[in-house]
Image (cartoon, rainbow, N blue to C red):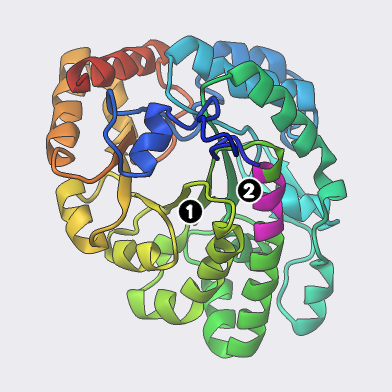
């Protein structure tokens, strides 16, 4: 049973009636819940201190360190949910893909996938491959109590783009060339990644995560027709695989204003929206039956408090008619963000939306 389920007695578990999970289920909330993508990370001095001298991938595999980093923003900011500290390439590393996260660059893959023979790098993921995840989530849920923990994974398209390009890309020329030049290999690659991603999310849910978010960080590079034909089926497979657990499923991508309806179709309960589309317009594009998450521009946090509050008020006003709203940034917290600005933002949203 996940931390999101009601036990057989009918009494709610610790997190079930949290503002975050209520908003995800489109139920009335005492206030609009807030959490931030990349809230556990480089903007916090306490994070930089505990990570000092420890490579990123290694830090993701130390349960005590993962627990501490995940809890830091909950303690400091009073956010309504924790996000499990990890990286989208962790499951790929866990199955033996030769990759590393290079500071200032990002994930770099030693042997990019360009041919059918290269698919041999991608075996099935087992819970034993990521036993440190199960251990860390057990530690976290014991500490978090009534605060939900969000598990996460990278979506098949975004993982594929790293594997094909060999690292981050601005143009995705190799990815798109494979997608259009060898549609069957592309479909087989994404299907295999969907299975790996689903297995990774299942481990997190079974360990106690109350919700999961699928990050399709780079899906905004695609035209809607290509997304529908070549990407949506794999993302939908991931969401179907975890549907039976009953935990809210969040879907987020950057620059995906033209894809919002399709991302909702993939099976998410909550659609994340970046800062380019107002939430009332996003709701029209997504359609009924979904909660929305977002969508303050993270760069606004560098402005004076009055300006941050004014833009936040715009987001809240645009969200006023939504069935469910989880306040977040339109992308991740930037490394040089003043942590106090985030703390003030949480308090402002809570105060302004108290019911």
All told, the count of numbered labels is: 2
Q: Is residue 8 above or below residue 194?
A: above
Name the quadrant of the N terminus.
Answer: top right
Secondary structure of the residue carrying tag 1 is loop
Residue 313: numbered disc: none
Q: Is residue 261 above or below residue 252?
A: below
Q: Could you tell me which residue is drawn at 30 percent across and 39 percent down?
A: 27
- Magenta highlight: main SS: helix
Badge 2: residue crowd in 10 Å (few <14, some 14–19, many ≥20): some
**Location of residue 31 (image quadrant):** top left
- Judging by the rendered image, the residue that carries numbered circle 2 is 88
Q: Is residue 74 left or right of residue 272?
A: right
Q: Is residue 190 above or below residue 31?
A: below
- Judging by the rendered image, the residue that carries numbered circle 1 is 217
Magenta-colored stretch includes residue 200: yes
Cβ–Cβ under 8 Å for marks 1 and 2: yes
Q: Which mark sits nearer the N-terminus, 1 or 2? A: 2
Q: Could you tell me which residue is drawn at 79 percent across and 75 percent down?
A: 118
Q: Position of residue 279 (x, y in %)?
A: 20, 46
Would residue 58 be seen by someone viewing this image from the given angle? no
Q: Position of residue 71 (x, y in %)?
A: 59, 19
Name the quadrant of the C terminus.
Answer: top left
Magenta-colored stretch includes residue 39: no
Would residue 129 be seen by someone viewing this image from the given angle? yes
**Location of residue 264 (image quadrant):** bottom left
Q: Is residue 24 left or right of residue 198?
A: left
Q: Position of residue 29 (x, y in %)?
A: 29, 29
- The part of the chain drawn in magenta is 198-205
Q: Could you tell me which residue is drawn at 57 percent across and 73 percent down?
A: 175
Badge 1: residue crowd in 10 Å (few <14, some 14–19, many ≥20): many
Q: Position of residue 322 (x, y in %)?
A: 20, 45
């Amino acid at each position: 049973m996940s931390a999101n389920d009601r036990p057989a007695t009918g009494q709610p578990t610790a997190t079930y009636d949290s503002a975050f999970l209520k908003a995800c289920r489109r139920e009335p909330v005492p206030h609009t819940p807030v959490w931030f993508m990349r809230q556990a990370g480089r903007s916090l001095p306490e994070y930089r201190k505990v990570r000092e001298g420890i490579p990123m991938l290694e830090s993701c595999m130390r349960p005590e360190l993962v627990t501490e980093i995940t809890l830091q923003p909950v303690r400091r900011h009073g956010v309504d949910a924790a996000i499990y500290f990890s990286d989208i390439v962790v499951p790929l590393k866990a199955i033996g893909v030769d990759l590393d996260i290079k500071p200032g660059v990002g994930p770099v893959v030693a042997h990019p996938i360009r041919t059918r023979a290269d698919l041999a790098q991608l075996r099935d993921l087992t819970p034993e491959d990521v036993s440190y995840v199960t251990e860390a989530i057990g530690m976290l849920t014991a500490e978090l109590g009534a605060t939900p923990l969000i598990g996460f994974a990278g979506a098949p398209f975004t993982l594929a783009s790293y594997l094909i390009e060999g690292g981050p890309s601005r143009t995705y020329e190799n990815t798109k060339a494979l997608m259009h030049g060898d549609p069957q290999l592309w479909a087989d690659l994404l299907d295999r990644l969907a299975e790996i991603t689903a297995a990774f999310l299942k481990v997190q849910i079974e360990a106690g995560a109350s919700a999961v978010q699928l990050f399709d960080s780079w899906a905004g590079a695609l035209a809607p027709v290509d997304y529908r034909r070549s990407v949506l089926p794999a993302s939908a497979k991931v969401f179907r695989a975890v549907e039976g657990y009953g935990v809210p499923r969040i879907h987020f991508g950057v620059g995906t204003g033209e894809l919002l309806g399709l991302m909702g179709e993939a099976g998410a309960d909550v659609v994340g929206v970046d800062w380019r589309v107002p939430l009332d317009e996003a709701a029209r594009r997504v359609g009924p039956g979904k909660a929305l998450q977002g969508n303050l521009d993270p760069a606004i946090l560098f402005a004076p408090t009055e300006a941050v509050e004014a833009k936040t008020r715009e987001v809240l006003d645009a969200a006023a008619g939504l069935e469910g709203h989880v306040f977040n940034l339109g992308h991740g917290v930037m490394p040089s963000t003043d942590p106090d600005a985030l703390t003030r933002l949480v308090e402002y949203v809570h105060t302004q939306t108290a019911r």
